[in-house]
Structures are given as structure tokens and as C-alpha cells.
Amino acid sequence: TSPQFDCNGRILRLDRPRVMGIVNITPDSFSDGGAHFDAEAAIAHGLRLAQEGADILDVGGESTRPGSQEVPVEEELRRVVPVIEGLARNTALPISIDTSKPEVMRAAIKAGAGMLNDVYGLRREGALDAAAELGMPVVLMHMLGEPRAMQEAPEYDDVVGEVHRFLAERIFAAEMAGVARKNIIADPGFGFGKTVAHNLQLLAQLRRFTELGVPVLAGLSRKKTIGELTGRDEPRQRVHGSVAAHLIAAQNGATIVRAHDVAATVDALKVWAAVAAVAPPRKDA
Ligand SMILES: Nc1nc2[nH]c(SCCc3ccc(S(N)(=O)=O)cc3)nc2c(=O)[nH]1
């Protein structure tokens, strides 16, 4: 019996590796350079990812890439609520909200989202209580420091051990706050305060994180590590490298991968699942 998540009435089954499609809300190109965001374009993109075979859609209103600045809560709400409402109305897929702010978590669930995806691991003021009260599945991710400075000179004695310990502590904190363990997903946070070498170690040893006893999510799509390994400077040129990395993540125990290029990733994981179905049981199973 494989785990499944009830995401506000929409079910995400983890009987095989699943694809979380990325729906970023970007400034619209016709705006007067002001902070207008194109909800219609984001909704259309999400529906396209659903067509491509996404199992869940991840909506984010604040960039957390290295060097990014925080977005005020009112602005983040203005961006994500219309997109979540539009997606919830037009697709039956579960929707996750990529936010660290408790107010945004609450509004997103009210608007129809069914999973919290917090790159800050519920460490913001009020986030643990919000997650516990909302009772939805939640992704707890590791980040070293803050997006603004996390990539300056990340250092670890033992990156896998330290990320593992952080995730164990956040899972404990979440359970103590009232989050049901069956609702927790762990994520090592590729690219969030890690060098290429750190990311490679985390991917090579990803199975260590399944020892936490919760499903593991991996998000490597179009990230700098893929670019450096393949020499592809443009994120759009990193599809093949990203698919390879997510295939390895599935082989190493990930049951959700977070991707931009959904169709390519879905096809790769179909091949993976067919082979996994006939493979002899794992020795460490
Ligand atoms: N659970 C989960 N949620 C996520 N949300 C994001 S947004 C990506 C921000 C970013 C962009 C680019 C680089 S870089 N410098 O490595 O290319 C790092 C971080 N990612 C993840 C992830 O992994 N998991």
C-alpha cells in the first residue's frame, strides 16, 4: 500500500514517482513596468502542464532564487489567489502553494490549493501553527540561510548529514505543532545554499532521506547545477539534463519531482516505472 495525500479533496497517489509542474507568476509584458502580474497567462500555463501529464501544480508568487528579495504579503496574495482560483476551477489536479508566509498559506487553501510547499521549512513566524490548523499535506525543505545570500559561500562538514538532521528537526517541530506525520514530505532543497558538489552528493545519497520515513521530493529542474554539468547557460536548454537528474532522483527514492518540462519528465518516469515494476525487490527494502 503506497502513501496517498488528500489535498483539499484532490488525491495525490504516490504509487509511483509523480510530477509537480511549476507555475510561476511573472510580470505581464504589457504592463507599464509596474507590478502587474498576468494571472491569465499563469492559469493557461498550468492547464497546459495538466495536459502534459502533471500530477500536481505548484503555484509560486515569490521568487526564492539566489539573490531574490522578499515580496510583501499583500503583493504575494494578489499574485497567487486569482491563479489558484482559476486553476482549481479548470482542472481536477491537486494544487500546491509555494510560500513561506502563513497568511498566504491560509488564503491559498481557501482558494482551493491542497498542499503547502514551504522552501523555508515552516520556520517563519506563525507558519507551524498555520500548517497544523490547515491540516493539509506539507513539503518541508532545507535551505541554508536566506535566498538573498544562500549561494555566497555555502559550507558544510557533511552536507548529507547536516541536511538530514535539519529535516528530522523540522519534521519533529511540525509534529509537535500538530501536523500529522502522514501529511509530511521532505525535500533536501537542491540549489538552496549548496555548491554543485553539494547538490551532487545530495542526489547520489538521496536514499538517505527516505530513512526519515516520509516521501521525498526532489527539485532540480533547470537549476544552475544542471547548467554547469551540461554547459547549458540558458535554463530553457537544460531540459535533458533536468530529466536525467530527476530519473536518478526517482531511482534513489524520490516519489515527487518538481519540474518545468512536464511532458519530458512524465515520459522518462513512465520508462522508469515500467522497469521498477519488474525489478527484483531491493536488498534494503
Ligand atoms: N519543494 C521545493 N520547492 C521549490 N521551489 C523552488 S523555486 C527555485 C528557486 C531556485 C532557482 C534556481 C536555483 S539555482 N541557483 O540552483 O539555479 C536555486 C533555487 N525550488 C524548489 C525545490 O527544489 N523544492
Image: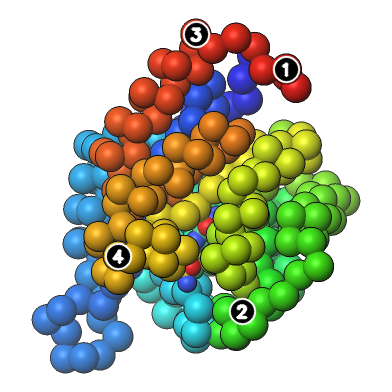
Which tag is nearer the camera, tag 2 or tag 4? 4
Colour mapping:
rainbow
The residue wearing badge 2 is: 150
Give the quadrant of residue 149.
Answer: bottom right
How many dots with numbers?
A: 4
Which residue is drawn at the image coordinates 30% and 65% (left, top)? 232
Q: Mark 1 and mark 4: span between their CA atoms?
A: 37 Å
User: In terms of sequence position, does the residue under pointer 2 or pointer 4 come before the other?
Assistant: 2
Q: Is residue 141 rendered to the left or right of residue 110?
A: right
Q: Residues within 10 Å of mark 4 (few under 14, many from 20)?
A: some
User: In terms of sequence position, does the residue under pointer 1 or pointer 3 come before the other?
Assistant: 3
Q: Closest to the observer: 130 or 243?
A: 243
The residue wearing badge 3 is: 278
Q: SS class of the residue under badge 2? A: loop
User: In terms of sequence position, does the residue under pointer 1 or pointer 4 come before the other?
Assistant: 4
Whether residues under marks 2 and 1 lie with C-beta atoms below 8 angstroms apart, the answer is no
User: In terms of sequence position, does the residue under pointer 2 or pointer 3 come before the other?
Assistant: 2
Q: Mark 1 and mark 3: span between their CA atoms?
A: 15 Å
Q: Mark 2 and mark 1: span between their CA atoms?
A: 37 Å
Q: SS class of the residue under badge 4? A: loop
User: In terms of sequence position, does the residue under pointer 4 or pointer 3 come before the other?
Assistant: 4
Q: Closest to the observer: 45 or 9?
A: 45
Q: Is residue 123 rendered to the left or right of residue 30?
A: right
Whether residues under marks 2 and 3 lie with C-beta atoms below 8 angstroms apart, the answer is no
Q: Which mark is residue 232?
A: 4
Which tag is nearer the camera, tag 4 or tag 3? 4
Give the quadrant of residue 37.
Answer: bottom left
Q: Mark 4 and mark 3: span between their CA atoms?
A: 35 Å
Whether residues under marks 1 and 3 lie with C-beta atoms below 8 angstroms apart, the answer is no
User: In terms of sequence position, does the residue under pointer 2 or pointer 1 come before the other?
Assistant: 2
